[in-house]
Image (cartoon, rainbow, N blue to C red):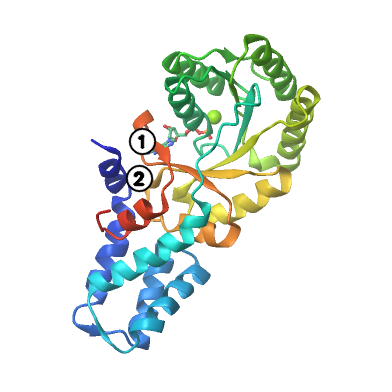
Amino acid sequence: MGWLDRLKTGLGRTTEKLSGGITELFRGRKLDRAALDELEELLITADMGVSTATRLTDALAKTKFDQEVSADEIRATLAGEIAAILEPVTKPLEIDTSHKPFVVLMCGVNGSGKTTTMGKMAKLYKEQGHAVMLAAGDTFRAAAIEQLQVWGERADCPVIAHDQGSDAASLAFDAMGQARDAGSDILMIDTAGRLQNKNNLMDELKKIIRVIKKQDETAPHAVLLVLDSTVGQNAHSQVEVFSDMVDVSGLIMTKLDGTAKGGVVVGLAEKFGLPVHAIGVGESVEDLRPFDAREFADSMMGLSS
Ligand SMILES: Nc1nc2c(ncn2[C@@H]2O[C@H](COP(=O)(O)OP(=O)(O)O)[C@@H](O)[C@H]2O)c(=O)[nH]1
Ligand SMILES: [Mg+2]
């Protein structure tokens, strides 16, 4: 299966809700106030958020108010508007090779997909010819360390790990040194995501960043917030919470395949304007890809790009 098919299949539940919903709404119908309200509600239930939903319906009303409209016209117009919202955040993660290593810090709540995404990215970067090192910075759970080691084997990348329960910052410090000694191009550092104790997590992340900067004051070069799309609107508060703790430089949206809430990506783009580097639509390496505004918008509306 090629990427576009994976994307379409992955976004299936969101597409079904949106595209299917639009078909139901617009059967030989005028785009009057009632129709706009119903459409707005549909967009909100796909987790676009209220302000994005309003913006999208306003855009439709501007050109088509009180006209007979087909579901296809609505889908095409919405896809265009959505792509326009997503365009500014479509930015693949650029690896600046003048940094050696280019340091990537992964953050996000437990279960959001940090370790898996890191493993997938490591494999992709490795295949592109970069020397990649991984650091098992979620020292809280033994399973998290083992999980990263499995990905390390799969991606054929060394994994720096300390014992469970050890200090994450000292692991990060050690990893920085080892990556430099080994001449690694990219160092990816995993972290724990225990948001239950926000202050502890904040202290831990800040300490990790402090020790990284001791070895390279320009690092970390990317701080990626991994968000589970199935949490819908809750993703907004996760962005706020993590942005308070660290300078989030970009987002990765995972598990778009498990939800009809794919609209959350659009709402996040509109509200925060943070780059969306990649999206995950399944558990395998092939299911993680750089984000593309047009592809995403068209897939969500059930159009073929
Ligand atoms: N369906 C699906 N599952 C995913 C995706 N990304 C991650 N997962 C799964 O989500 C679960 C939690 O991922 P993990 O990387 O351990 O999360 P972490 O706690 O943030 O490190 C694992 O079972 C992953 O396989 C995705 O894009 N789609
Ligand atoms: Mg993990």
The percent coordinates of residue 28 (x first, y second) are: 19, 82
Q: Residue at x 47, y 54 (%)?
A: 265
Query: Which quadrant of the structure image shows residue 217?
Result: top right
Residue found 67% across the figure and 50% down from its top? 241
Please say whether residue 69 is visible from this viewpoint: yes
Q: Residue furthest top?
A: 181
Asked if the residue at tag 1 contacts the one at tag 2, i.e. Cβ–Cβ closer than 8 Å, the answer is yes
Percent from the top left, x then y, of residue 266?
47, 59
Q: Which residue is mark 1?
A: 287
Q: Return the residue at label 2.
A: 257
Residue 209 percent across, percent down from the top left = 74, 32
User: Which quadrant of the figure has residue 33?
Assistant: bottom left
Ligand 1 occupies quarter: top left
Q: Give the Cα separation between the discs numbered 2 and 1.
A: 10 Å
- Residue type, mark 2 in image: Asp
**Residue plotted at (58% across, 20% down):** 185
Q: Quadrant of the N terminus?
A: top left
Earlier-in-chain disc, 2 versus 1: 2
Residue 237, relative to residue 200: is it above or below? below
| Residue 73 pos. (x, y %) | 26, 73
* Helix, strand or loop status at disc 1: helix
